[in-house]
């Protein structure tokens, strides 16, 4: 979870080795949450992206590096104008190895002073993922001309493409 799932999904769709990036909800306790429910900020869910990747082409370390590059992990419960716990910076880890890798990266970034403020990204055990409604999937690709895509998603994509230019999927 790194703010609006549309942004994170669009970025990871471009990383070589990512098989799929799906927008959805994680971290809460109700069954089958909807966008309207999650948007209240009272469900415990965060907008999140579930990433499936080919370990022969990328790894969790690189995925976390991209994650920490394309959003502001020092913002508590917000990214830009998107406010609320549903927009928190969070890593849902599936096992202790993933938690350790995430903890190490956060520690290194904080020690290096990579940001002006301390990283507030939380590490939470993965309890499940609910895929978001179909209109949320591939939102950037389907809505490039919309203002949110141009003013919020596009700058994140441009930063990602500049920093990770050698790791982009080949255009078909």
Image (cartoon, rainbow, N blue to C red):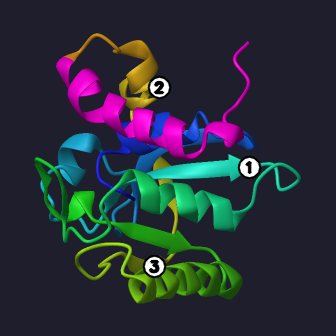
Residue name at image x 51 percent, y 38 percent? 162
Give the percent coordinates (x, y) of residue 144: 35, 15
**Percent from the top left, x then y, of residue 167?**
69, 42
Q: Quick check: 168 above or below 150?
A: below
Magenta stretch prevailing secondary structure: helix
The disc, 2 or 1, on the residue closer to the chain's N-terminal end is 1
Mark 1 crowd level (few <14, some 14–19, many ≥20, 10 Å Cα): some
Task: Give the camera-side residue of 87 and 44.
Answer: 87
Q: Nearer the viewer, residue 150 or 142?
A: 150
Task: Where is residue 30? Give x, y as percent.
Answer: 33, 63
The mark that comes first in sequence, 3 or 2, is 3
The residue carrying mark 2 is: 138
| Separation of residues labelled 2 and 1 (CA atoms) | 17 Å
The answer to whether residue 126 of the structure is visible from this angle is: no
Q: Contact (CB < 8 A) between labels 3 and 2?
A: no
- Residue 63's label in the rendered image is none
Per the rendered image, the range of residues in magenta is 147-172
Residue at image location 38% in from the left, 30% down from the top: 136
Q: The residue tagged with tag 1: helix, strand or loop?
A: strand
The quadrant where residue 62 appears? bottom right
Q: Which residue appears at 47% of the width and 34% of the height?
A: 10
Q: Between residues 116 and 140, which one lies in front from this camera angle? A: 116
Q: Residues within 10 Å of mark 2 (few under 14, many from 20)?
A: some
58 lies left or right of 132: right
Residue 50, magenta (yes or no) = no
Q: Residues within 10 Å of mark 3 (few under 14, many from 20)?
A: some
In the current view of this chain or complex, which residue is farthest to the right?
56
Q: Position of residue 24 (x, y in %)?
A: 43, 46
**Can you see residue 121?**
yes
What residue appears at the point 36 percent right and 81 percent down from the top-left corner? Answer: 113
Numbered tag placed on residue 53 in the rendering: 1
Q: Which residue is mark 3?
A: 109
């Amino acid at each position: 979870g790194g703010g609006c799932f549309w942004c994170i999904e669009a970025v990871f769709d471009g990383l070589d080795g990512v098989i799929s990036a799906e927008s959805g909800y994680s971290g809460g306790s109700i069954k089958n949450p909807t966008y309207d429910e999650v948007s209240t900020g009272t469900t415990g869910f965060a907008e999140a992206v579930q990433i499936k990747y080919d370990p022969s082409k990328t790894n969790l370390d690189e995925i976390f590096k991209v994650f920490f590059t394309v959003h502001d992990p020092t913002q508590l419960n917000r990214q830009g104008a998107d406010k609320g716990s549903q927009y928190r910076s969070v890593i849902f880890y599936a096992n202790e190895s993933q938690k350790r890798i995430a903890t190490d990266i956060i520690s290194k970034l904080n020690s290096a002073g990579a940001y002006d403020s301390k990283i507030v990204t939380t590490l939470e055990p993965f309890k499940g993922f609910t895929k978001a409604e179909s209109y949320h999937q591939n939102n950037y690709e389907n809505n490039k001309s919309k203002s949110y895509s141009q003013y919020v998603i596009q700058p994140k994509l441009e930063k990602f493409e500049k920093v990770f230019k050698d790791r982009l999927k080949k255009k078909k």
